[in-house]
Image (cartoon, rainbow, N blue to C red):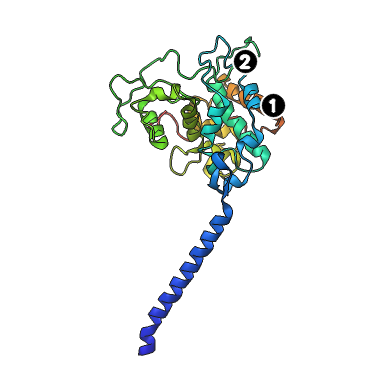
Amino acid sequence: MGKMMARPATLLLLLVVAVTAAGVADASKSKQKTCDKGWECSGSVYCCNETITDYFQVYQFENLFSKRNAPVAHAVGFWDFQSFITAAALFEPLGFGTTGDKQTKMKEVAAFLGHVGSKTSCGYGVATGGPLAWGLCYNHEMSPSQDYCDPNYLYPCIDGVQYYGRGALPVYWNYNYGLVGDALKVDLLSHPEYLEQNATLAFQAAIWRWMTPMKKKQPSAHDVFVGNWKPTKNDTLSKRLPGFGLTMNILYGDNICGQGYIDPMNNIISHYQYYLDSMGVGRQFSGDNVDCAEQVPFNPSYKAATS
């Protein structure tokens, strides 16, 4: 009887020892996996890789956005390399620009900035330097077509505040300012103007959007670009396959995708490939599935709660 009564205690002791040993092993394993690169990247396995400043320098940023401070640009003196790198440092420990081999890292930076350049460009066909040299020409929407205020109990509009497009990947609508603000711990619902006053914050908002899935069980633009995501059977049938094209699907849905080879989609691709060339990677390494012409959007606008 005494032996039988002792068995649960013995098993419990063994279980505690096993769990403790596993915990020590996990802690040891996690300690081995993290690296510290100072201000730019620390406390993450991704920091053991090259960081963005190891392969992307000021002169390359200047080459990509060579006309952003031209007299006719609309955000002269606002955007700079330091703002981008400071913003990126918040996300490099999460894998932004630090995932995969060097070419994958450079391609991700080119892809992200390709979106940014396209969405902030004032370039046109006969513009000096060509239409792709004018990214970061704007930091806000010049002639808002509406007030972008939507009834929303989580993020209600503030009286007198306008929610037109601002930033590097322009943010529109009160609920999006609220969402991004919560993520970055900044009250953008009350002060959306911060995105056109602080370039680092504007880049942070854009990188957050790149790194963050918009719905559960959906990937982020980062994930589909660097190879962290595998399509389901339904995704394959919907022609949603990993690559630059799917980043457009995630960021813009049917505003860009599933409409054939329309100019707005082609323009984003052109910026991405121009940046690949400028960074020394070369457009021949654009990857598979570069367009989204025939993709079914993840979140069709007629179903979507946000746009």
Q: Secondary structure at mark 1?
A: helix
Q: Where is 124 relative to 198, above or below?
A: above
The C terminus, quarter of image = top left
Q: Quadrant of residue 59?
A: top right
The answer to whether one can see residue 95 in this image is no
The answer to whether one can see residue 228 in this image is yes
Q: Which mark is residue 255?
A: none
From the image, tell me which residue sits under label 1. Answer: 277
Residue 157, image x, y percentages: 30, 25
Residue 21, image x, y percentages: 50, 68
Instruction: Give the camera-side residue of 114 and 161.
Output: 161
Q: Secondary structure at mark 2?
A: loop
- Residue at the far bottom: name it: 1
Q: Which mark is residue 131?
A: 2
Q: Count how many numbered circles sit on residues in the image.
A: 2
Q: Quadrant of residue 171?
A: top left
The N terminus, quarter of image = bottom left
- Whichever of labels 2 and 1 marks the residue nearer the N terminus, that label is 2
Write the residue at 65% across / 38% down: 104
